[in-house]
Amino acid sequence: MKQTEAHPLFAEERQEQIISLLSQNTKLLVPDLCDYFHVSPATIRSDLRELAAKGRLKRTHGGAIPINKTIYEPTNADKKIYNTPEKQAIAALAAQLVEDGDTIAIDAGTTMMELAKNLVGKEELTIVVNDLNIAVFLEQNTFSNIIVLGGNLRKGQQCTVGPITLSALTSLNVDKVFLATNAFTPEKGFMTPDINQAEVKKAMLRTATERIVLCDSSKIGKISFVEFAKLQDINKLVTDSGIDSRIRKYLDDNQDTIQVLYA
């Protein structure tokens, strides 16, 4: 957790970022938050008191812990600060699975944006997207044929969901789909916090011959609200070597079900 430049924030903005940080950490300490936000301990303690009063976190001596283990979804802007080197390495490896001439679908989010960056230079791709930021990047930096799915725009996520999005996906067939996930456990599968996003992920899976999930190790072993796929629904999982040893053994023992690629 590191923020190198001071950016003055309103209390409400800072508190939302604290909740976002807490969703990715088992605890937060007051000194670390002071360094991150460049504010005084008194300011951070006041923020934590307010958030605890609203039931959004639990105060502890010297800091705070999550109120429960179910993942809250940060905004796209906040997600950019999490595990960037791992996301970049995972995306670079996943991009090697894309061949010139492929028709692919790409899920929404910051990991998928890293994948999009690695598609620059690929030729004759047709790419189905529901993330507006990814669509603009690909249009500006590649010669690919970009198909943007319409629908309701998710606040804070810049991606489309809902019945229009799902209807568009029913008529499509792609070679490969690349999905992000907010959480994974062997027992509960791949999960996301948003019901509408989960439905889009399920619909994307149905379009594809080959199904690939990108997931950095910070999300493995975590629980989120809605399952969108079981392990057996996925052909390949691209992750990093920092995953929990118990889950890594489970995945390695199930290579006949899913191929795991470590970045």
Image: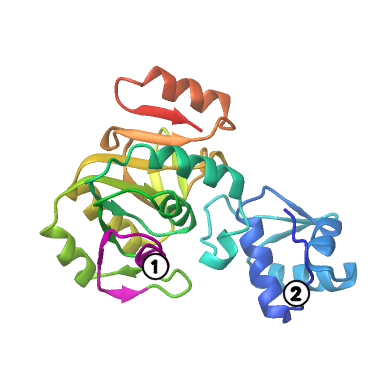
What residue is shown with label 2?
A: 7
Q: CA distance from mark 1 to mark 2?
A: 29 Å
> Disc 1 residue type?
Gln
Residue 195 screen position, x and y as percent: 34, 61
Q: Residues within 10 Å of mark 1 (few under 14, many from 20)?
A: few
**Front-most of 200 and 51?**
200
Query: Mark 1: which secondary structure?
Result: helix
In reply to whether residue 138 is colored magenta, the answer given is yes
Residue 50 screen position, x and y as percent: 73, 74
> Residue at left 38%, top 50%?
119
Magenta region: 132-153
Q: Earlier in the sequence, mark 1 or mark 2?
A: 2
Mark 2 and mark 1 in contact (Cβ < 8 Å)? no
> Residue at left 60%, top 55%?
23
Q: Is residue 189 visible?
A: no
Residue 74 screen position, x and y as percent: 54, 63
The part of the image, by quadrant, that contains residue 254 is top left
Specify whether 55 is left or right of 221: right
> Disc 2 residue type?
His
